[in-house]
Image (spheres, rainbow, N blue to C red):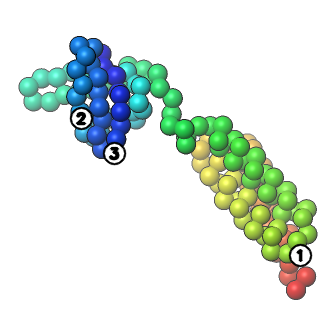
Amino acid sequence: MAKILKIQGDTVQVGFDDGSLREFPLYLFGFPIYEGDLVEAYENEHEIVFSKISNTASAPPNETPNEYRAMAAWALALGVAAMTVPIPFIDIVAGVFGIILANKAAKNGVRGLATAALIFSIIGTIFSIIFTMNFI
């Protein structure tokens, strides 16, 4: 058994049960790996093959679902603000940012809230454009 200790660029440091530390190119791992993952290593004189045992490590901090839920909540707030705040151009910007955030959240698994945020943001942006055109 071995443990993924460090991933740096295209190089992975793997610690083995005997206390040894070896570096391998990232392409040798045919599956997503994170620091802390446990793997089995099978080696002969020509090659080494890795097999994933478990995902004991968590995803990197920038991939946590909570961040995407928060992003979808902000997108919903921006969409509602775009619909209700009658300030020319600021409401358009709020709606566009709401659309962008909702899209990113939806692509990362936050479907329900992101869909509602996207609808509110699109409608808010359309209302804002109409309001701004009447204002000018």
Q: Which residue is mark 3?
A: 9
Q: Visible in this render: residue 31?
A: no
Query: Looking at this view, is 9 or 54 the one in front?
Result: 9
**In the figure, is residue 119 to the left or right of 53?**
right
Which quarter of the rendering shows the N terminus? top left
- Mark 2 vs 3, N-terminal side: 3
Q: Position of residue 52 (x, y in %)?
A: 36, 24
**Up-down relation of residue 56 to residue 34 (above or below):** above
Q: Which residue is mark 2?
A: 24
* Label 1 element class: helix
Dot 1 amino acid type? Phe
> Mark 2 touching mark 1, by CB under 8 A?
no
**In the figure, is residue 75 to the left or right of 2?**
right
Query: Looking at this view, is 10 or 42 the one in front?
Result: 10
Q: Residue at x 74, y 53 (%)?
A: 75
Q: Position of residue 120 (x, y in %)?
A: 81, 56
Instruction: Work out how far the residue at label 3 is from the one at label 1, CA to CA, in angstroms.
Output: 49 Å
Q: Residue at x 76, y 46 (%)?
A: 73
* Label 3 element class: loop
